[in-house]
Image (tube, rainbow, N blue to C red):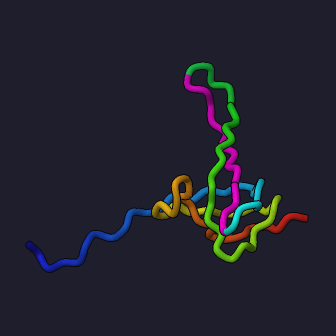
Amino acid sequence: MSSEAAAPRARRKAREGVVVSDKMQNTVVVVVEEKKPHPLYKKVVTLNRRFKVHDEEGSCGVGDRVRITETRPLSKEKRWRVAEILEKAK
């Protein structure tokens, strides 16, 4: 056994999306829109994925553009955390 420290954590995934619901305590729902070509037909397809995201301060509102980062499981469905608010809703 070597006395070196454990390996550093892997780089965490980050996504940008729009808050669509803030009705829960400490949780917001963020929609991340991803455009990618269809594997066979090559048409660009829009995929909308909804993430439950931890928002400790409760500072996010509906329509805010946010950056989220992957984190340890916080509840049954929450595996993401708000990293920063990029743009507040108008």
Looking at the rendering, in which quadrant would you find the C terminus?
bottom right
Q: Residue at x 55, y 25 (%)?
A: 39
Looking at the rendering, in which quadrant would you find the N terminus?
bottom left
Camera-nearest residue between 77 and 69: 77
Outermost top residue = 41
Q: Is residue 27 magenta?
A: yes
Q: Position of residue 27 (x, y in %)?
A: 66, 63
| Magenta region, residue range | 26-39
Compared to residue 66, the image places residue 59 above or below, namely below
Q: Position of residue 82 (x, y in %)?
A: 63, 67
Camera-nearest residue between 78 and 69: 78
Compared to residue 46, the image places residue 81 above or below, namely below
Q: Position of residue 21 (x, y in %)?
A: 76, 56
Is 28 placed left or right of 8 in the picture?
A: right
Compared to residue 33, the image places residue 2 above or below, namely below
Is 8 placed left or right of 90 in the picture?
A: left
Q: Residue at x 69, y 54 (%)?
A: 30
Q: Position of residue 89 (x, y in %)?
A: 86, 64
Q: Residue at x 68, y 31 (%)?
A: 45
Camera-nearest residue between 2 and 59: 59
Camera-nearest residue between 12 and 50: 50
Q: Quadrant of residue 41?
A: top right
